[in-house]
Every structure is written in C-alpha cells, then in structure tokens.
Image (cartoon, rainbow, N blue to C red):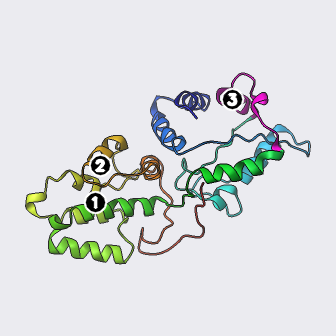
Amino acid sequence: MTAQQIDAIAEIQNVGAGSTFRYRALDALFSLGPSVALRLRDEVSRSAAERYAVLHEIKGGTPPRTRPGSIRHEVGSVNAILSLLHLSDSPANAARESAAILGPEPLAAFHDGGTLDGYLSVLARTQPKESRDHVAVLGALRGRIVSALWTELGDEGRALAERLTARGELARPDAGRRLADLVRPEAAGHPLLAVLAHPFDPSAATWDLSEVDLVLRRYGCACDSWETAVLTTSQYFEPVLTTKGAHGHADRDHDLGTD
C-alpha cells in the first residue's frame, strides 16, 4: 500500500480534517510489510445487506468489543487500527476501495483463489512472525532506556527498576514517570527522560515517532519497525493490554500471531 492509496481509502471513508491523525497511524501499519486483498464469493444468494452483516460478524468488532471466535479475536489486536484486518463497509465502498488499490479494472488484478494457500505460506516466510503487543513493546523500550540511564538513576531508581522488571511491570502507565523522577539531580535534563515517562497511549500528547527515534538512536535505544507501528498507533487508539505486567497481572488469552 502506497501513501497515495492510503489517502484514497481515507477519503472514501470520509476522514475529515479532524481525523487526519489516521493517516499517520495507517502509514505506520502498512509500512510493516505486504498486504493481501481478498475477494469473497457468496454462494448462498444473500442480499448485499445480509452479506455484509455476516462478514462483519465473522470479522469481529474493534477492541474491546472483539467477540471470541471472530477473526480479530483469534488473530489478535494491538489496538483498533493495528488489528491487521480491514473490511469494506458496503458494496459501494468495496468497489471504490478496490479501484483505489488495484486500479481501474480491479477484477483483472485478482489471481486464481486455488493458489492462495501456497502464496500465503511463502509470503509468511518473508519476515519474522510478530506477537509483541503494546505492553511488550513499551516494556522493552523502557528497559533499553533504563539500561542507558543506569548510572544516572541512583540507588533508589535502580532498585525500583529491578522491582518493576521482576514483576513484569515496566509498561505500567506510571512506571516510566516514577523512574524518571528518581534520576540524580545532575541528570534531570537528560533527553531520554521525557521518552521514559511517556505512556504512548491516548491519555497523553501524541509524538512523532520519527523525531523520537532520533533521540533514541543517539543513545542506542532505537525502535524497530514493529515497535514504531505499535507505539504510533497506540497513541491514537487505546491499546489492548494482554501481556503480563500492564497492571501486575496476566490477562492474555491468545497470542497475537500476526505475520
């Protein structure tokens, strides 16, 4: 998906000036790797309204309304946008989105469905399988920052870091701020402290991860592409907390299993 195609889809979905943040989130999503467009054939002669109702039921709602048994529940979601699944809302939107993505003759762009299983098995080997959610990503980032600031933390800060790590609580919303508050006075203006304290969720100001990463790279704490996508999208859409540690307990009921 190119930036132009993403913009075209956003226009079809009536993303107005107040929702342009979705562009940045979608850019982060589609930069992760290839996308696959599927055309489904109805063999039961349903009406258009019935077909789309069935498809939406199979797809599942956005978190936290994701129903067990739906694709979004079984595949897993980091947040509402990073669920790795999109379904057109109507036949009209399906036609317009297909044209935007596949060109003026979208039907000619589809391949024989009989080859799909083999194609997907090969495509899945093109990059590592990914299962890190917001808690895992934020915890890892904070761990790298704490390691870089180890001498600046002082005894109390290092002790807190050890406790949070042992309990799997580095990604708690307040954990980064608590650690940042315990640095030695002479390190109070360190550029990494603001990143350490930031929750990367909708409760705080949104940051441009490309600018944040310039700071992180300077101190050997850079994010990879998956981490960038998770932290970018979770600033706009409430993250699903599944990994042990977000609130000191485990509530994961499935792996994300995203490829």
Residue extending furthest toward the top? 104
Q: Mark 1 or mark 3, which has the lower sequence index?
A: 3
Q: Earlier in the sequence, mark 1 or mark 2?
A: 1
> Which residue is painted at 75% across and 50% down in the image?
118
Inter-mark Cα distance, 2 to 3? 37 Å
Q: Position of residue 2 (x, y in %)?
A: 55, 31
Q: Tag 1's secondary structure? A: helix
Query: Do the residues under discs 1 and 3 have CB atoms within 8 angstroms?
Result: no
Inspect the image, locate mark 1, and give the three-letter code of the amino acid beneath it.
Ile
**Which residue is denoted by mark 3 in the rendering?**
102
The reply to whether residue 111 is visible in this rendering is yes
Q: With respect to residue 90, does 114 lie above or below?
A: below
What residue lies at 78% left-to-right and 37% top-to-bottom?
Answer: 111
Q: Spatial distance from mark 1 to mark 2, Cα to Cα?
A: 11 Å
Tell me, for residue 217, which label it has, or none: 2
At which x and y percent is residue 248?
41, 74
Judged left or right of residue 114, residue 32 is left
Which residue type carries mark 3? Leu
Quickly name the residue at label 1: 145
Q: CA distance from mark 1 to mark 3?
A: 43 Å
Q: Is residue 31 on the magenta stretch?
A: no
- Secondary structure state at the residue bearing disc 3: helix
199 to the left or right of 151: right
Query: In the rendered structure, which segment of residues is drawn in magenta?
Result: 91-113
Residue 6 figure quarter: top right
- The answer to which quarter of the image holds residue 147 is bottom left
Q: Residue drawn at (91%, 46%), measured in percent from left and top?
A: 44
Left or right: 236 with respect to 254? left
Q: Residue 232 bears which disc, if any? A: none
